Image (tube, rainbow, N blue to C red):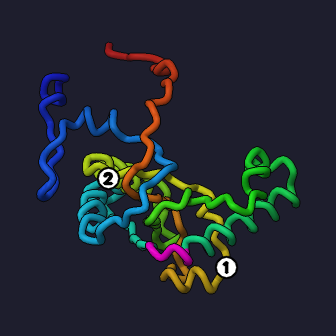
Amino acid sequence: MNTLQLEKMEVTHIGLGTMAYPEVLLKRRSIRKYLDKPVEIDLLKIIIRESTLAPSAGNEQPWKFIIVQNPDVLQKISEDCKETLLARIAANPHDYAKKYEHMLQNESFNIFYNAPCLVLILGERDVKNLLFDCTLAASYFMMSAAAKGLGTCWINFARELKKPALLEQIGVPANHTIIAPIIVGYPAIVPPPPKRKTIPILKITND
């Protein structure tokens, strides 16, 4: 597909008009400040449906989704994940999460930035390419949300959810693993685009 054709591609969503595909790519941000406004379930279902248009290895489509909108449950998940991460740091000072230690120690810090909604993308842990398949679905999810005026942020801290009672409460089956925890909501602040690094094309072989 040439550049001209790419620029003419449009993203269409029910009742929400169209947006040129390059605009969707430019509009997506990691949002950490949200309006106190719920995201409609019907809209979330549309975004999830569009995210399942992502490619998957062998077309297995192994992804599953869980929606959490209860603020008390979100707070409990945040507290459990912070506790797990701080325990990890205490056991191994060289853990990658060490740089977030002060933030995690702050009792008022919520790993979901008080977003109104969390969507978990997960699947059966014995699926060989689950990580890649769910990550592709997550990318589609974030682009679909951006096209509809919503903000998202992948919260990797939430993969540390360990408490069995909480996992059961939100509906995570015992043989499943959480790949992509994504918060979603209406942005209160949209940050400017971050500076991008030089594109590292290592080599072009055309003969």
143 to 109, vertically: above or below: above
Q: Which amino acid, mark 1?
A: Lys
**Residue 101 shown left or right of residue 169 in the figure:** right
Residue at 47%, 44% (x, y): give it. Answer: 30
- The CA distance from mark 2 to mark 1 is 29 Å
Residue 70 lies, in percent from the top left, at 48, 76
> Which structural element holds mark 1?
loop
> Which structural element holds mark 2?
helix
Residue at 73%, 51% (x, y): give it. Answer: 103
**Residue 146 shown left or right of residue 12 in the figure:** right
Viewer-side residue, 191 vs 167: 191
Mark toward the start of the polypeptide (2 vs 1): 2
Q: Which amino acid, mark 2?
A: Ala
- Label 2 neighbourhood size at 10 Å, few (<14), some (14-19), many (20+)? many
Read off the magenta span: 69-73
Residue 21 lies, in percent from the top left, at 22, 37
Q: Is residue 137 magenta?
A: no
Q: Name the residue under label 2.
A: 145
Viewport quadrant of the N terminus: top left
Q: Can you tell which quarter of the image residue 23 is in? A: top left
**Residue 106 shown left or right of residue 72 in the figure:** right
**Residue 116 shown left or right of residue 2 in the figure:** right
Q: Can you tell which quarter of the image residue 46 is in? A: bottom left
SS assignment for the magenta stretch, majority: helix
Viewport quadrant of the C terminus: top left
Q: Name the residue under label 1.
A: 163
Residue 145 lies, in percent from the top left, at 32, 52
- Label 1 neighbourhood size at 10 Å, few (<14), some (14-19), many (20+)? few
